[in-house]
Image (cartoon, coloured by chain):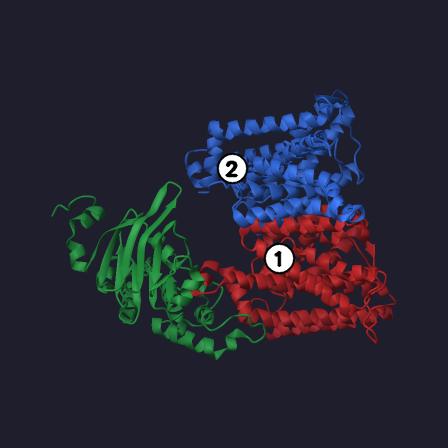
């Protein structure tokens, strides 16, 4: 990574780290809440970028893991299990398992079949969520208490929770960065570039793509656990396929295959949503065509516009 | 569980299947011929329902509602094709999916702006509001019977067009080789616009028939779209025959599952557990079916031969 | 004599109404260079695809080094010692030439479920890759994006990638396709250095290349072999001339 890039990143993280202080000074806790929410979606977007941007797998079913992660926290809480040490590993593990099953079936196909199948499976999970009355059906569930970790790690404290999310985001970015340059990452990226060539050279690409699919699902499951802690509520609509579309837009907007771009994309998308929503309750009528135009004309994404672009 | 009840649910399954077919036919045609994944197809279904309902409410004539719904949606479809979709034919599927997703957001909101977010009131037209006695003890809503008949008629019409007419030949040829067809002097652009418009009209037909029995509200096309995708995957992308078979199968499995899985499980799991497990499993059935088909026939049941 | 390194029996493949491979038999001895020639549409590329594992035959058997590989996919065959270059250049355009070859090395250097260490820092991958690039004459171009290489250089890169997998048998599908005279000659020189140490099955249209390299020639028409033998024998074979020219040449 070029120096300009590293500096841009560092600057970004410093800004994020200062938000709680700034919000406190301005006496606007809303900003803290907003940025924290955006960072959670950024985690989801980064996880999608691994398979979409680097792997070329157009999975329209990624929101499913937001839902699974969320339910993995809310359901135990419903039954009195509030320990984050139980809930969060469950969120990640369950998401990984579901990703394994869905990926195993879906990755046997490619192209448009793959897109449709991932869409279909997500919707299946959504319907599953709506139909289970004990867990709120389509009204959803309240989260009784935020995940408990004991000691100083009190997610009930807005600032502590904020830094937990920030730490996880930075951690994910760092791990992702190492991964895409390691052997595994190269295999995924080269498979996107030319899969027949990879197979000719001796890579059994299916297993690597499946592994990437599972990792991405697991990371998104973590985002789901964070999301339900954030809103203290969850509905099956977290898993609706249109939610997958939102996350995908964040990735594209920020820059596919850049890992950091999706973070930017999440910020712009959600802030835009807020701004437009204040302007008109029908903001989606603007967002729709805007998306179409972005896709048609601005494919490189915002990350490509920042200093240090086009290196690597 | 009486035989007549099963028969009635089979008819419901057929009715749902026929509506899925109307959507699937348009979607699979557009994909087969233009290689375009159009997620906004569900929006055309919705728009058809809205136009028809508005016209019916305004004029009191169901027939006028149907005509207006079809024609207006045809126009909207062709307009969308010319303005937004032409550039997408050359693009990869990701771009197409994202762009048409943007169209969904637009249409859902546009419809809410014009008609509001609450469901639109609509009823089955009085002429069709009665019941038909199909068998002793089996009375079936006339309206649903009409839907089945219309759907089957459209299927027959499509079969005749695609396999027996020159237009159908052009369509099939266009599917395999666009440049060849263009070289023959056929106006490919016009052909594509017409095919898309036709697909839109089919979706609208499905939507306007669905209106009186389902709810007319923003986003009504989003969920059925996924079921249509399941139909196409099972039937084979690009194949009308596959769309029909897939649609009927999906329609039946889904309807029968929803109707009978809960009572069937009740005996095994007890009524309380079955109350949740029944609908939950029923809602997953068609996806499990899709996964099963894919294991054995990854290209679907009747894949269209692509050039 | 045994069947040889590669042995094909009764290979069949049809696409709808088109029979691409029609009961084909073939033997390739260890260390020999076999050229497969034939008019367009003879099914040569389909044959290569079935030999490399990219395409499953409808019927028939393929034995490599004494083992039945018919059911194996391309990655497994690569690990048995088969390597392929493609008729239409197939490389990783967004990666450097060195990256391209290093990937081929990586495929045969253990598994790739390594998530932490940068692969580009692994000398065990980079050094052999540099060697291969040097071998094919691309040492100076190691850091150039593969997509930016000249056409001839890309074909050379394909050979480097094939060699990097340390194969026993190379399947080369029109290695000089689209190359000018100089580039072709360089390629032929390179392939000459491989004769003897590597077994090669070479599909080619350029007869100069064929006669410069082949120990044996096998002629395919409509999915079957109509003649096989030493170059001079083939050159004189009337059936071959008829297949290529459509009639007896009026000389």
Q: Horizontal and vertical percent for residue B79?
A: 62, 36
| Left or right of residue B58: residue C250 | left
Q: Horizontal and vertical percent for residue B105?
A: 70, 46
| Left or right of residue C20: residue B18 | right
Task: Give the residue displayed 42% in from the left and 74% down from the top.
Answer: C129
Both labels 2 and 1 in a single chain = no
Q: Secondary structure at mark 2?
A: helix
- Dot label at residue B189: 2
According to the picture, the residue beneath numbered tag 1 turns out to be: A101
Of residue C203 and residue C58, the one placed in the foreground of this image is C58
Hue of chain C?
green
In the picture, the quarter occupied by the N terminus of chain C is: bottom left
The chain under label 1 reads A
Q: Residues within 10 Å of mark 2 (few under 14, many from 20)?
A: few
| Extreme residue in the left direction | C251
Task: Give the residue displayed 38% in from the left and 69% down from the top.
Answer: C160
- Dot label at residue A126: none
Q: Horizontal and vertical percent for residue A189?
A: 53, 64
């Amino acid at each position: 990574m070029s120096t300009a890039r590293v500096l841009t990143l560092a600057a970004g993280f410093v800004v994020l780290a200062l938000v709680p202080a700034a919000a406190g000074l301005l006496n606007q806790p809303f900003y803290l809440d907003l940025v924290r929410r955006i960072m959670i979606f950024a985690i989801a977007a980064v996880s999608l970028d691994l398979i979409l941007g680097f792997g070329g797998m157009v999975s329209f079913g990624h929101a499913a893991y937001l839902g699974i992660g969320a339910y993995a926290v809310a359901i135990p809480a419903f039954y009195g299990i509030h320990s984050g040490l139980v809930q969060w590993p469950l969120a990640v593990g369950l998401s990984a398992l579901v990703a394994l099953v869905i990926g195993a079936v879906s990755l046997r196909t490619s192209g448009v079949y793959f897109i449709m199948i991932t869409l279909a499976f997500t919707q299946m999970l959504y319907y599953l969520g709506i139909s289970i009355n004990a867990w709120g059906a389509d009204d959803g569930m309240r989260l009784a208490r935020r995940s408990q970790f004991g000691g100083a790690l009190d997610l009930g404290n807005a600032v502590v929770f904020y830094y937990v999310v920030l730490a996880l985001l930075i951690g994910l970015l760092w791990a992702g960065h190492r991964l895409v340059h390691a052997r595994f990452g190269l295999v995924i990226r080269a498979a996107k570039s030319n899969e027949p060539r990879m197979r000719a050279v001796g890579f059994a690409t299916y297993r690597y793509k499946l592994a990437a699919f599972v990792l991405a699902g697991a990371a998104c499951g973590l985002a789901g656990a964070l999301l339900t802690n954030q809103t203290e509520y969850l509905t099956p609509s977290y898993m609706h396929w249109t939610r997958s579309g939102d996350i995908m837009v964040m990735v594209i907007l920020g820059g596919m295959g850049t890992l950091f771009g999706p973070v930017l994309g999440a910020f712009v998308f959600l802030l835009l949503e807020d701004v437009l929503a204040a302007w008109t309750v029908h903001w989606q009528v603007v967002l729709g065509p805007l998306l179409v135009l972005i896709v048609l004309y601005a494919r490189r994404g915002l990350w490509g516009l920042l200093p240090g672009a086009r290196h690597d | 569980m009486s035989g007549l009840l099963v028969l009635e649910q089979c008819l419901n399954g057929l009715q749902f299947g026929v509506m899925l077919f109307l959507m699937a036919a348009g979607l699979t045609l557009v994909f087969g011929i233009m290689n375009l994944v159009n997620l906004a197809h569900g929006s055309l279904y919705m728009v058809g329902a809205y136009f028809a309902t508005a016209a019916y409410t305004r004029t009191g004539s169901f027939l006028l509602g149907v005509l207006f719904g079809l024609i207006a949606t045809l126009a909207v479809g062709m307009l969308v094709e010319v303005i937004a979709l032409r550039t997408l034919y050359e693009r990869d599927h990701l771009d197409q999916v994202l762009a048409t997703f943007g169209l969904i957001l637009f249409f859902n909101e546009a419809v809410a702006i014009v008609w509001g977010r609450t469901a639109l009131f609509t009823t089955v037209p009085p002429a069709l509001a009665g019941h038909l006695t199909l068998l002793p003890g089996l009375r079936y809503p006339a309206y649903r019977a009409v839907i089945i008949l219309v759907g089957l008629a459209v299927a027959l019409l499509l079969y005749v067009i695609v396999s027996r007419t020159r237009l159908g030949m052009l369509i099939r040829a266009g599917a395999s080789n666009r440049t060849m067809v263009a070289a023959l002097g056929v106006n490919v652009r016009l052909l594509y616009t017409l095919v898309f418009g036709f697909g839109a009209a089919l979706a609208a037909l499905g939507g306007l028939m669905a209106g009186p029995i389902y709810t007319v509200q923003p986003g009504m096309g989003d969920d059925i779209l996924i079921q249509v995708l399941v139909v196409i995957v099972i039937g084979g992308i690009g194949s009308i025959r596959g769309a029909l078979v897939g649609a009927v199968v999906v329609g039946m499995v889904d309807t029968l599952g929803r109707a009978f899985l809960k009572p069937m499980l009740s005996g095994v799991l007890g009524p309380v557990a079955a109350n949740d497990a029944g609908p939950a499993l029923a809602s997953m059935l068609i996806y499990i079916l899709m996964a099963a088909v894919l294991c054995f026939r990854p290209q679907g049941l009747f894949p269209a031969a692509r050039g | 004599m045994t069947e040889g390194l590669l042995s094909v029996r009764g290979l069949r493949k049809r696409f709808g109404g088109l029979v691409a491979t029609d009961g084909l038999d073939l033997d390739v001895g260890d260390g020999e260079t076999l050229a497969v020639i034939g008019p367009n549409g003879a099914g040569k590329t389909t044959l290569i695809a079935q030999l490399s594992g990219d395409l499953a035959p409808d019927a028939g058997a393929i034995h490599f080094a004494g083992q039945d590989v018919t059911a194996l996919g391309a990655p497994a065959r690569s690990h048995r010692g088969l390597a392929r270059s493609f008729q239409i250049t197939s490389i990783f355009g967004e990666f450097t030439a060195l990256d391209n070859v290093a990937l081929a090395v990586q495929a045969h250097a253990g598994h790739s479920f390594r998530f932490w260490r940068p692969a580009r820092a692994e000398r065990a991958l980079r050094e052999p890759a540099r060697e291969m690039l040097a071998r094919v004459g691309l040492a100076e171009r190691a850091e150039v994006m593969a997509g930016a290489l000249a056409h001839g250089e890309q074909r050379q890169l394909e050979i480097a990638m094939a060699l990097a997998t340390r194969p026993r048998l190379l399947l080369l599908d029109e290695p000089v396709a689209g190359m000018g005279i100089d580039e072709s000659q360089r390629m032929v020189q390179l392939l000459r250095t491989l004769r003897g140490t590597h077994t090669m099955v070479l599909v080619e249209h350029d007869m100069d290349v064929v006669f410069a390299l082949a120990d044996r020639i096998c002629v395919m028409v409509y999915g079957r072999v109509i003649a096989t033998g030493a170059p001079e024998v083939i050159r004189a074979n009337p059936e071959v001339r008829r297949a290529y020219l459509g009639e007896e040449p009026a000389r």
